Image (tube, helix red, strand yellow):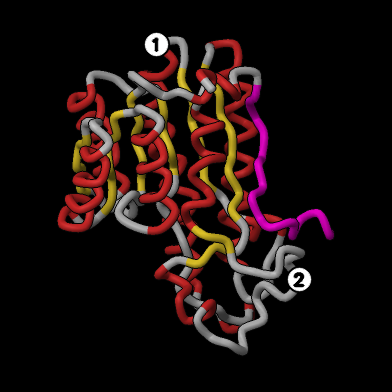
Amino acid sequence: MKAFDLTGKKAFVTGASRGIGRAIALGFAEAGADVALVSRSAESLAEVAKEVEAYGRQAAVIPCDVLERDSIPAAVQSGIDALGHLDIVVNNAGGSNFLVEFKDLRLSGWDKLLRLNLDSAMAVSHAVADHLLSRGGGSLINVASVAAKGAPFLAAYAAAKAGVVALTKSLAVEWASRGVRVNCLCPGWTATDMNRNLWQNPHDTTVATVPMARWGKAEEMAGPAVFLASDAAAYMTGQVLFVDGGLTATS
C-alpha cells in the first residue's frame, strides 16, 4: 500500500545496533528509507549498515553514547549532513539490565536509567526540533514500554518510560500545528539480548499474564514503527501504540 511507502524518506534511529532499534531501522530500509544508525558501537552499526544497504538504501553510521548529552547535537547534525535532511526520528535507545526491589535500589542506578531512557529521548528531540519544525513536517517516534503503566522491581525504568509517554504527548500538542507528528511506540515484553536471561529461563513467569502467552519478537515492532513514520498515520499524533500481545487489554 502506497501510504506505508517510505521511499525517499530519511530516518535517524538511536539504539540501532541491536534488538528493537535494529529491527526498526531495517523495517524502514525495506519500506524505502535511508537510515542514519546511531549507537555506541561503530562495529555493530557497520553490520546493520550492510543490511540496510542490501535493500538498496543509504546507511550512515554515527557512533554516539546517548548518556553523553553534549554529544547528541553533533550526532543529529551528522545524520542531517549524511542524508541531506531528516523526516523520521526514532528515540529507541534505552533499557534496563537489572531487577531490584525499590527499597534496595541504588540512587545512582535510578539516575542512570532516567538519563538513558528519558533524558536521551528529550535531548535528541531537543536537538532535532528546529530542523523538523523549519521543514514543516516529520514524524518523531519515541519508544517507551508497557512498563510505563507500572512494573514491580523496575521502578526506575517504568518511571522513565512513563516520562517518555508524557514527553510524547506534550511535544505532539506543541508541534501539531507546525506539521510534526509525535507518537509513542510501547512494546510489550520483547525478547532481546538484554533480557535473554529471562526469556531463555523455562521457569520465568514474565509473560504469564500475556494473552498471547509468549514473548514478542523485535521484528514485530518494525511494522508498527513503519506505520507511525508513514503517511498512513498522517492524522495521528500524541498517541501511544501498545504492541504487547494483549497485555494492556487485561488491565
Measure the C-alpha gap from mark 1 to mark 2. Answer: 44 Å
Q: Residues within 10 Å of mark 2 (few under 14, many from 20)?
A: some
Position in image of residue 249 (x %, y %): 81, 54
**Residue 250: within the magenta?**
yes
Front-most of residues 183 and 187: 187
SS category of the residue bearing label 2: loop
Residues rendered magenta in the picture: 236-251
Quadrant occupied by the N terminus: top right
Residue behind mark 1: 135
Position in image of residue 61 (x %, y %): 19, 42
Q: Earlier in the sequence, mark 1 or mark 2?
A: 1
**Residue 246: within the magenta?**
yes
Q: Residue furthest right?
A: 251
Residue behind mark 2: 209
Position in image of residue 74 (x %, y %): 22, 35
Left or right relative to 235: residue 50: left
Task: Inspect the image, locate mark 1, and give the three-letter code of the amino acid beneath it.
Answer: Arg
Left or right relative to 43: residue 215: right
